[in-house]
Amino acid sequence: MEAGAIKVLIADDHSLLRQGLARLIEREERITVVGQAANGQEAVEMVGETFPNVVLMDISMPVCNGIEATWIIRRRWPSVQVLALTIHDDEGYISEMIRAGARGYVLKDAEPDNVFQAIYRIHDGETFFPPDLMEKVMERFHYLSSEQSPHSSVPSHQEPLTRRELDVLECIVKGLSNREIASALYISEKTVKNHITSLLRKLHVSDRTQAAVLAVQSGMIRGGG
C-alpha cells in the first residue's frame, strides 16, 4: 500500500461487483482497498478492524442494510466517511443516507472517474452528490419543510450569515465542490474554506450536507435549481 493512500472498504452483497470494483479502484495510485464486506453488519465489523478512510456503501443488503450500517459507522467512528454506491436514485433513499451521515452518493452506472472523484472529495472533507440527485433531494426537503411548517425560518437566536456566506451556501446546495465554488464566486479555495467554516459554526451543524438541508428547510436557500 502506497504511503498516504486513501483506504477504502467496499460493502456490497454482490461478490462480482465487489471484486470488479476493487480491481478498478486498485488501479488508482492514491487509493487502496483494505477490505470487502457482503452486508452492513460485516461492514461495521470490518471498519473496526481496518479503520478505512472511506466506505463505499451499498444500500440494499441482507442482515443489516446500508442505511443502518452508515448510522452505526458514523457514530462509532466519526472520522470514517461513507459514500453511497447504489442503483437507487430515489430521493427517499438519498435523504435517508444523508440523515444517516453519508457524505456522498454515486449511482452504480456512473463513470469510474466519478467514483474516484467522489472518494477524493469526501476524503478531503467535502461532499459529492451529482447535481441532478442533489436537486431532487433539496426539492424533497423543501416540500417536507413546507408541509410541516410553511413559515419556517432560521431561529431568531441564529447568528446571521454574511452575503458572501449565503452565496457559498447556495453553491453548496447546488452540490458544487470547493474548487467550483471558488471559480463561480471569483475567490480562492482557501477563502471558500474559511467561509464554510464560519457558516457551519453559525448554523450549528457539523458538515456541508447538514448545512444544505438546513438552508432549504429553513427557507434561507430555495432548493431545486
Image (spheres, rainbow, N blue to C red):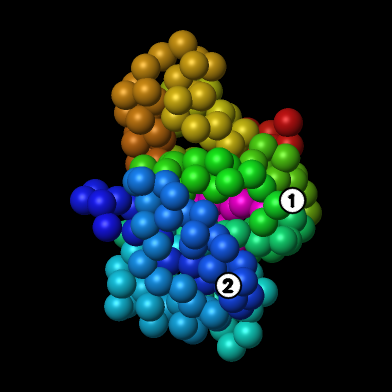
Could you classify mark 2 by the number of other residues whose Cα lies within 10 Å: few (under 14), some (14-19), or many (20 or more)?
many
Residue 223 coordinates in the image, percent (x, y): 69, 37
**Secondary structure type for disc 1:** helix
Residue 60 coordinates in the image, percent (x, y): 67, 74
Q: CA distance from mark 2 to mark 1?
A: 27 Å
Question: Residue 140: which numbered mark, if any?
Answer: 1
Magenta-tinted stretch: 97-107
User: Image height check: is 196 above or below 188?
Assistant: below
State the residue in front, 115 or 78. Answer: 115
Residue 76 coordinates in the image, percent (x, y): 35, 73
Please report the residue visible at 50 percent of the width from the left and 41 percent of the height from the top.
Answer: 117
State the residue in front, 145 or 77. Answer: 77
Question: Residue 217: which numbered mark, if any?
Answer: none
Task: Specify the quadrant that holds the C terminus.
Answer: top right
In-image side of 112 versus 225 (left or right):
left
> Residue 106 in magenta?
yes
Return the residue at label 2: 12
**Secondary structure type for disc 2:** loop
Amino acid on which the number 1 mark rests in the picture: Arg
Please report the residue visible at 37 percent of the width from the left and 23 percent of the height from the top.
Answer: 189
Residue 3 coordinates in the image, percent (x, y): 21, 51
> Residue 127 in magenta?
no
Task: Specify the quadrant that holds the N terminus.
Answer: bottom left
Please report the residue visible at 52 percent of the width from the left and 54 percent of the height from the top.
Answer: 24
State the residue in front, 12 or 135. Answer: 12
Decide if residue 53 is in sight here. no
Q: In terms of image quadrants, where is residue 26?
A: bottom left
